[in-house]
Amino acid sequence: MAVPKRKMSRSNTRHRRSAWKAVAPTLVECANPACDGKHIPHRACGECGQYGARSARRQVL
């Protein structure tokens, strides 16, 4: 395991940690015109279950 030879200064530590920002996920509108929900891109909608032009949920007959 690598061990640092010298103590890292406060300014270097804070400069490195400044890149640890949390980013809000991007959301897109659902393709279903009846649904007005938003979801993460390339995922099925959580409200209606539609993925693009297809429905992700199976219809029970």
Image (cartoon, rainbow, N blue to C red):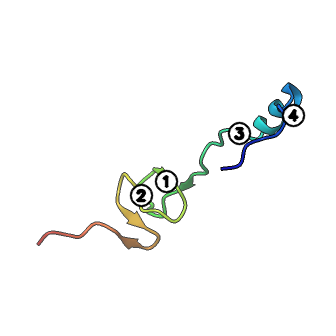
> In the depicted view, which residue is nearer to us: 56 or 9?
9
In the rendered image, residue 8, in percent from the top left (x then y), is placed at 83, 32
Left or right: residue 5 versus residue 21 is: right
Q: Is residue 13 above or below residue 35?
A: above
| Disc 1 to disc 2, C-alpha distance | 5 Å
Mark 1 or 3: in front is: 3
Point 55% across, 61% down: residue: 41
Q: Which residue is mark 3?
A: 20
Mark found first going from the N terminus, 2 or 4: 4
Mark number, residue 12: 4
Mark found first going from the N terminus, 4 or 1: 4
Mark found first going from the N terminus, 1 or 2: 1
Tell me which amino acid carries mark 2: Cys
Mark found first going from the N terminus, 4 or 3: 4
Q: Which residue is mark 2?
A: 45
In the rendered image, residue 56, in percent from the top left (x then y), is placed at 34, 68
| Disc 1 to disc 3, C-alpha distance | 24 Å
Tell me which amino acid carries mark 1: His
- Using a 10 Å C-alpha cutoff, classify the residue at mark 4 as few (fewer than 14 neighbours), some (14 to 19) or many (20 or more): few
In the rendered image, residue 28, in percent from the top left (x then y), is placed at 57, 56
Mark number, residue 39: 1
Mark 2 or 4: in front is: 4
Q: Is residue 61 above or below residue 22?
A: below
Tell me which amino acid carries mark 4: Asn
> In the depicted view, which residue is nearer to us: 17 or 27?
17
Q: Secondary structure at mark 1?
A: strand
Q: Quadrant of residue 50?
A: bottom left
